[in-house]
Amino acid sequence: MAALADAPAEPLGRVVVVAGRAEEFIADVPYRVETFSAEKLRTGTMASSIPDALLYTPSVMVQQTARGQGSPYIRGFTGFRTLAMVDGIRLNNSTFRDGPNQYWATVDTWAIGRLELLEGPAGVMHGSDAIGGAINALMSPIVYGAQGQRVHEGAAYYRVASADNSHVGRVQYSEGVAGQWGYAVGISGKTYGDLRAGDPVGTQPYTGYDQWDADLKAEVILDERHVLTVAYQRTQQLDVKRTHRTVHGLHWEGLTRGSDLEHGFDQLRELAYARIRTDTERGDQFTATVSWQVQEELRTVQKANKTYQDDDVDVGTAGVALQGVSPSAVGQWTYGAEHYHDAVAAGTINRSAAGAITGVGIQGPVADDSSYDLFGAFVQDELSLPMRTQFTAGGRYTWARAGAGRVQDPATRLPVSYSDSWQSVVGNARLLWHPDEAEHWGVFTGIGQGFRAPNLSDLTRFDIARSGELETPSFQLNPEEFLSADAGVRVASGRWASSGCYYRTWIQDMIVPTPTGQVVNGLREVVKRNGAQGYVEGVEWDGELRCLAGLALYGSAAWQQGETDYFPALSPVGYRAPMSRGAPTTGIAGTRWTPETWLPGLAVEVFGQFSARQDQLSPADALDTQRIPPRGTPGWMTANLRVSYAWRAQVRASFAFENWLDESYRIHGSGVNQPGRNVRASLDWRF
């Protein structure tokens, strides 16, 4: 369970979210929204990353190419077709790939105050990439006391796990004077050893890595109507290995190993922003944000002949965003505009086995000396209608421009420049109905358009593709278009709570890799092309029944299917096949005991998680035998125990005994197997 495991089955309006950009009760959000509190992240799931936190969420499949890298598939989409944000600022940039990527793991889970996942089309409010859904990581809030009173709070966290011999620690401190100023500062250190999978796989070599995180947030209350916020975050990952491409990959269930001797990543992300919020007498709220984000990655590959290839991509993103929320006689209006500018430097260096430089590439994995601009302006109105009905409609204008200063021409292999731009208008309409005045029930439905312009990864990538092909630049690309519809119900009344949803997304002109029939540098060449049509649909459900004596039963399930077009080499005609890395049927069933009457603070949870076999493979899946077994990814089931105890609100200790049957399994499309029998323990101390 995600949201329902956190809160009792009471009226839905008690949880406040910002999924639709403005603060509102979750009961008034006409989408399916999951929330994760800081307590659940740190001492509930004890998640090591945002993807790790989403492992138990219906309709989310968390693919892991490597430890320290995770990419959620939300309603069938991942990579640059899902949007990640930090305090409302885009994490996505123009170098993100279409497949799974590692960037979501660069947000420190232990520095998050609340995590919000909006499933389904969010393009009007959140812009390009939000096709499958959008996630917003809201950093830890500053502590405040009574007006004018100075208060402070310190905290220390520690978590250990046996399957990877990992140690994670964090210290943070916050101080504030209500109505005047406040700040919060924290630092996290994480070290992970080689991961032990279930029997008979055992230890997976070269899967350990280290990570450091730091964050600072400060607020100054300028006057009763103006608040200035400044923040800084930094994350650095060191030596994260992708073992499936190396000789250290697994032979489990017929998997093949790669030929590289080493394939590792170093990752750095920094974000700084300043935001001013203004509240007017009549109830308007305006915010203005300026941000600067740096994302750097260095990939080092040692090939079978012992030579090296170093690829680096450095992206600096400047952002500015303006937003307003205004009540009126015809509803509540949310409107604004935002602009993000990426400046990209990328390079490739070849080295001999002794380390001497033997060659310098024209570009890196994407074009060198390149830029990308993304501008959007949006407006949305929430209108209250009779019979406790809410109608929401909105639209967004998007303009995107790509400029590549130095890219290798796919025909001549010489350096050329390239530029192009695209624009679109998309809209949505949502309906929410509360059958009862207490808002225990909510029924929602809606339809929305999605638009994604080609980014620098689509247009200029010169890199090894997922199945061992060489992807070369593709200049003649047009935007992708999507149309999504869903309908669902949620209820929280008395002793039970439940939510369910059916969704379907129609795909038009999706950009897909296509073989050219040529061989370049000993590798089959693929290029990107438009034209893929298709769909993805699914059903998701979760529920909880609270029995007597603090006992609760809960469960969740998700089913999904999808198809898209694929194109043989040099063929203008495609054929329909299963969608790449389609999620298998999954579910959770468990029981939770919280004996509040005689031992407050204790929680005991026993649950099982299962996944069906996934043998409906796309053509690319069938070739990806380093990650997907030839007969498909086997089904699996794990049994798990969690115990936590809070003492006087200052100390919370947690213990988990996971996968006690020592099942050997992997999540479909992943490059590593999941932990075998594993013990996790954590301590959260506030002072």
Image (tube, rainbow, N blue to C red):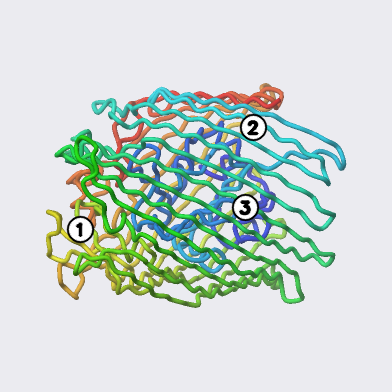
Q: CA distance from mark 2 to mark 3?
A: 20 Å
Front residue of 272/96: it is 272
Circle count: 3
Q: Earlier in the sequence, mark 1 or mark 2?
A: 2
Q: Which residue is mark 3?
A: 273
Q: CA distance from mark 1 to mark 3?
A: 43 Å
Instruction: Give the residue type that dot 3 points to.
Output: Tyr
Front residue of 422/631: it is 422
Q: Earlier in the sequence, mark 1 or mark 3?
A: 3
Tag 1 and tag 3, C-beta contact below 8 Å: no
* Numbered tag placed on residue 619 in the rendering: 1
Q: Residue at x 68, y 72 (%)?
A: 383
Q: Is residue 481 above or below residue 285?
A: below
Instruction: Give the residue type that dot 2 points to.
Output: Gln
Q: Which residue is mark 2?
A: 172
Q: Residue at x 62, y 59 (%)?
A: 290
Q: Nearer the viewer, mark 1 or mark 2?
A: 2
Residue 651: image x %, image y %? 65, 24
Q: Is residue 530 left or right of residue 447?
A: left
Q: Is residue 400 left or right of residue 612?
A: right
Q: Residue at x 67, y 46 (%)?
A: 10
Instruction: Give the residue type that dot 1 points to.
Output: Pro
Quadrant housing residue 205: top left
Q: Residue at x 36, y 37 (%)?
A: 240
Q: CA distance from mark 1 to mark 2?
A: 48 Å
Q: Is residue 399 above or below residue 54?
A: below
* Numbered tag placed on residue 391 in the rendering: none
Asked whether residue 255 appears in the rendered view, the answer is no
Tag 1 and tag 2, C-beta contact below 8 Å: no
Quadrant housing residue 617: bottom left
